[in-house]
Amino acid sequence: MRRTVIIDAPSNLGLRPPAPGQVPGCHGLAAALRARDLPRRIGAHDGGIVPAPPYDRGDWRPGDGVFHAEQLATYTRRLADRIGALLDGGDFPVVLGGDCAIQLGASLALRRRGRFGLVAADASADFRHLGNAPAVGAAAGEEVALATGRGQADLTDIDGLRPYLREEDIRYAGIRDGDEDIPELTSLGMGVVTVGALRERGPAAVGTELARELGGGGRAGYWLHCDADVLDPAVMPAVDSPDPGGLAPAELTDLLRPLLADPGCVGLNVTIYDPDKDPEGTAGDKLADLLVAAFAPRG
């Protein structure tokens, strides 16, 4: 039986400042979930922390490429090393972010070991690149594009392994209906299940179907990425870009449970929750509770 092992990845390097002179608070996600006893509640072992470089964009200006690129490349390697050691030991890593750029660490770790898929439970595609936008900068909105080889080589070709993910191995669930990136994603062969389609088909059925899709086709398994902004801002306002029309906690739980239970799932990221934006702690409580429920066996 696989051990579940929690790693803290408190990097906020991929987000823009919430205001001039401020630092994004999502680096506190891991500590906040640990304070809610998440490791014990899901039966996880402690995998320690991969410390992140300090947040300092220096003299970066729009048009300079991805900010913090050098720090992100170094951090991606370090995180990939830690995730990879757990994968090689037969463990199930649960990586607590941090922003969505930590997904590059998981993608690189998987690429080092073969061909894997990605299921992203996310409000948006994080697929900004110079082919669809006038400029790039914030890697947390670009990590899937980077993982598929779109962008500067210091981030897309680490260890000479570009691309880390193939487009046809990527699935999204929970993207908002009418998102402007959907036509591009589907044209590239990525599967997209919007909030409306997920509700029509049922979250548990969608999760089961996605696990089945990515469990074959020459893939060795898939990684699950959960961005807290997939939830509706009414229950999860503590994110950098709250977007109306998202999932309820029970819907996200029902989506995640079959994906986590399937033997093809090799690990999980949780990202973007910002404790600084949650002074009463209610959003963090909901996030912890739904993750515990997602890991629980079906009754």
Image (cartoon, rainbow, N blue to C red):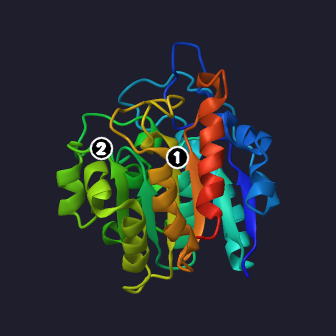
At x 69% / y 32%, what residue is drawn? 54
Considering depth in this image, is 43 or 148 the residue closer to the camera?
43
Mark 2 secondary-structure assignment: loop
Q: Which residue is mark 2?
A: 176
The three-letter amino acid code for the residue at tag 1 is Ala
At x 55% / y 71%, what residue is drawn? 110
Q: Position of residue 156 (x, y in %)?
A: 44, 56
Q: Is residue 104 above or below residue 178?
A: below
Considering depth in this image, is 5 or 161 the residue closer to the camera?
5
Q: CA distance from mark 2 to mark 1?
A: 20 Å
Can residue 112 be seen in this snapshot? yes
At x 60% / y 70%, what residue is drawn? 299
Considering depth in this image, is 24 or 296 the residue closer to the camera?
296
Front of the two marks 2 and 1: 2
Can residue 73 be seen in this snapshot? no
Q: Which residue is mark 1?
A: 101
Q: Residues within 10 Å of mark 2 (few under 14, many from 20)?
A: many
Mark 1 secondary-structure assignment: helix
Q: Residues within 10 Å of mark 1 (few under 14, many from 20)?
A: many
Q: Position of residue 134 (x, y in %)?
A: 25, 34
